[in-house]
Amino acid sequence: MSRSLGKRPPRRRSGGGGALLLLLLLAPAGLMMMPTSVLVLAGLAPTFVAYLIDRDPEKSAALTVGAMNLCGVAPFVVRLWQRGHEMSMTLRMLADPGTWLVMFGAAAIGWLMYFFIPQIVAAVMSLRNQSKIKELEERRSLLVADWGADVMGRPDGDKAEPVGLLDEQPE
């Protein structure tokens, strides 16, 4: 049987089996460490939301928010372990607004990083590129002053110098 040229075989979805396997492996550990599991699941809610709404295949928003969110949850997990690892302690922590402020505040910092760091990097790169263009134009003008217009590679030295990248264009 021949396949038509325009059709492709259906693609198999990957990744669903890995999540199920992870769930099967983590469920017993979560049950044995129930106070920690409850605290971590409640505290990482912004990470789960970021994962669900992130359309990027690399899930960069979920990674950024998740890393900062985990930094906000970690001190409370350590405190829970130091104070007996009991469900009553977990519930006391979750009843404290300061706990939520730290955990969700860290996630908010992750969102700020996700939105503003790419813009800052783009602005810095743009400034660096403009500086490089200006430096190259200065070097070009020094070469023309030392060697004449012939160094520009034009057969006619009578023509005007080409407009630079940073110069305003004539109207």
Image (tube, rainbow, N blue to C red):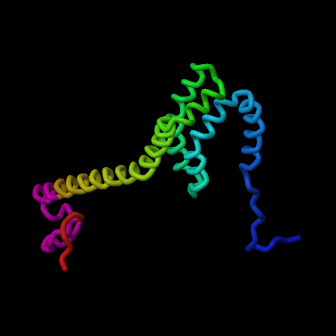
Q: Considering depth in this image, is 89 or 111 the residue closer to the camera?
A: 89
Query: Within the magenta stretch, is there residue 27?
Result: no
Q: Which residue is the extreme one toward the bottom?
A: 171
Q: Considering depth in this image, is 135 or 24 the residue closer to the camera?
A: 24
Image coordinates for residue 123, horizontal then vertical, percent: 32, 54
Q: Which residues are magenta?
A: 141-164
In this rendering, would 37 be left or right of 79?
right
Vertical relation: 74 (above or below) 57? above
Query: Within the magenta stretch, is there residue 153?
Result: yes
Please identify the quadrant where the N terminus is shown: bottom right
Q: Considering depth in this image, is 127 or 71 the residue closer to the camera?
A: 71
Vertical relation: 52 (above or below) 4? above
Image coordinates for residue 168, horizontal then vertical, percent: 19, 70
In this rendering, would 144 be left or right of 70?
left
Please identify the quadrant where the C terminus is shown: bottom left
Q: Quadrant of residue 31?
A: top right
Residue placed at 75% from the left, 71% from the top?
7
Image coordinates for residue 150, horizontal then vertical, percent: 17, 64
Q: Which residue is the extreme one toward the right?
A: 1
In this rendering, would 27 be left or right of 162?
right
Image coordinates for residue 81, horizontal then vertical, percent: 60, 22
Residue placed at 60% from the left, 47% from the top?
48
Q: Quadrant of residue 25?
A: top right
